[in-house]
Image (tube, coloured by chain):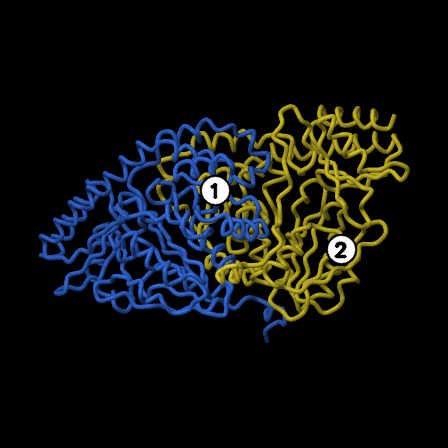
Chain colours: A blue, B yellow
Amino acid sequence: MENLWTKNLRDIEPYVPGEQSKEEDIVKLNANENPYPPSPKVVNAIKNFDCSLLRLYPDANALPLKEAIADYYNVSVSNVFLGNGSDDVIAIAFQALFNSSYPVVFPDLTYSFYPVWCSLFNIDYKTYAVDADFRIHAEDYKERNGGVIIPNPNAPTSLGEPREFVEELMSYNQDSVVIIDEAYVDFGGESCIELTKKYENLLVTGTFSKSRSLAGMRIGFAVGSEKLISVLEAVKNSYNSYTIDAVSIEAGRASILDDKYFRSTCNKIIQTRQRVTQEMRAMGFTVLDSQTNFIFVTKSDISMYEMFEYLKTKKVFIRYFSLPRIHNYVRISIGTDEEMDILLKEVKGFLK
Amino acid sequence: MENLWTKNLRDIEPYVPGEQSKEEDIVKLNANENPYPPSPKVVNAIKNFDCSLLRLYPDANALPLKEAIADYYNVSVSNVFLGNGSDDVIAIAFQALFNSSYPVVFPDLTYSFYPVWCSLFNIDYKTYAVDADFRIHAEDYKERNGGVIIPNPNAPTSLGEPREFVEELMSYNQDSVVIIDEAYVDFGGESCIELTKKYENLLVTGTFSKSRSLAGMRIGFAVGSEKLISVLEAVKNSYNSYTIDAVSIEAGRASILDDKYFRSTCNKIIQTRQRVTQEMRAMGFTVLDSQTNFIFVTKSDISMYEMFEYLKTKKVFIRYFSLPRIHNYVRISIGTDEEMDILLKEVKGFLK
């Protein structure tokens, strides 16, 4: 017999984070991590951090980091929100901005956490199918809704839409908040942060986890109107006032200030992506035109699942999604040139 | 005219974190921070951290830190939950464990965030008054409820209740989850972590912010039955899988492993507290018998608010609560002996 107290427990499907292999000498291309370390200036900021300050609470507003982000994107501090990774930022945005009797809407193929947050916060949602080429069409988002969230570029498709797409989307959605999730934008996408000055109901989110090589540090942000940011702050400060630790504030700030390093590593990843795309196409693969740090790949005459499993035996880890429409695709993160050469070699071995 | 989209925004009273003075040379006794730096082993862990690892996501389970905590408290890893500070841990616990049509119950004088979380998550609550001596009585908590949360020792009263209190509380509350918030327990309170082995519906929360001098690092934890922890994990992993950054995992682990330093700084604070308590009582103050790193102080013939304001002009910052029942009390965090000597000198100056 179950105890009565168990009736008060939240009945939620346990979401299990992807298993990450702890083996050495693997080629890890399954989590869209950056193959390059963070800026040497980030390393200095951490090594030189005055650890005696850790006895004190961090700045609840994480001002030094907010100022750096505001300057970088040419907005005010009051237009910037910070969180413990962009998952935290978006989870707070769902709670703060999506309170409607209409469903929140997003593409059918997209970041897998959106329906999870809807379920957690009891938010109704509806998806619109991306087309046969995996493109998102703004006119699909004309119906009245309780909010829109679209990653641009999208994952796992790797495809980005131009700024005009967001403008069109905003024209259809003047009565709800639109979130554009720009987690991957620094790898060749078109950012619409500038549009937040034009549209008070547009929120753009970003992360330091991919392009800034700081997945381990947990820094996410959002840029939007003062109105939107103030509601995010109210919810965040009613949940946990101090989400960004003192070391992360300094590390994040140092990352923003070293723009040269940032651009150089992003460019290296873009170059490697172009080369690998060409080489895989030459092998007969269909590779979508990625604007991200990963490629989305298929080959109609072979099983991508088998390739995924084969590569695992060669210690090359890529990502396979057992989902309708994309069950014969794999997502491959862009590593260093050396790592990608190993991938290409093993893929050739598999094709033989 | 307001835009329609603003109707979807969460209408929540913005909770404003306490203003922290950025002035130099102040005596900061207003946030219950530890006056001593973290263990030198924590500093080493941060200085020697391999920053190239920051490009990777941290261990979602933060296993090295969980293992250290589990060993320390003689429980299993599956009995330990981690969060971004204990505010994050308790906020998740409210969402995960307090889903009932009955109100959640807690004392009227207690941690100010409990009603804030109830409001954020739309949880009904009810408070029971602490007695004239600010003590909590377990028999008040006999009514059917949707969950119980009590800090032990309590804040801002500084008073702790013995383990028998928790045993009695559990005897009345077999049908709901009971959370004992042990944020201050290391300064002389009686921990009931051991009781989590006896009561499957008892969760004990703790923090590295006070006794471990790591407020800047954001580490909170909970210990409880596998049943409770698994529900906390399910909610946490549906919200944000990676709440503890890679540096915090190592810093937190190093703190747990340096038990000698931990005990020595806790003891220093307890010694200083006893001395300051005696000296303030000798000046005619009523000082409650604190089991925390702060004292709760009054004097019937003078205005504590005026003393609080006076001390501010002397760059000594303590905490005043403009609340019924305690409007003539102040909360004074225990600093170093040097800091407390300045406090005592300035208090004498005020009394003159």
**Direction right: furthest residue:** B301
Q: Nearer the viewer, residue A306 or A81?
A: A81
Comparing marks 2 and 1, which lies closer to the viewer? 2
**At which x and y percent is residue A286?**
15, 58
Q: Nearer the viewer, residue A111 or A223?
A: A223
The mark that comes first in sequence, 2 or 1, is 2
**Direction front: furthest residue:** B1
Quarter of the image where the C terminus of chain A is located? bottom left
Q: Is residue B80 left or right of residue A271?
A: right
Residue at which label 2 appears: B108
Q: Are marks 2 and 1 in contact (CB under 8 Å)?
A: no
* Callouts 2 and 1 in the same chain: yes
Amino acid under disc 1: Ile
Q: Is residue A304 left or right of residue B297?
A: left
Amino acid under disc 2: Asp
Mark 2 → mark 1, Cα distance in angstroms: 35 Å
Q: Nearer the viewer, residue A307 or A179?
A: A179
Q: Chain of mark 1?
A: B
**At which x and y percent is residue B178?**
66, 60
Q: Nearer the viewer, residue B22 or A164?
A: A164
**At which x and y percent is residue B221?**
57, 49
Residue at which label 1 appears: B249
Disc assigned to residue A72? none
Q: Residue drawn at (49%, 34%), measured in percent from left and top?
A: A64
Compared with residue A22, is residue B100 higher up or lower down, i.e. above or below?
A: below
Q: Residue drawn at (78%, 54%), measured in percent from left and top?
A: B136
Compared with residue A131, is residue A343 higher up or lower down, i.e. above or below?
A: above
**At which x and y percent is residue A40?**
35, 30
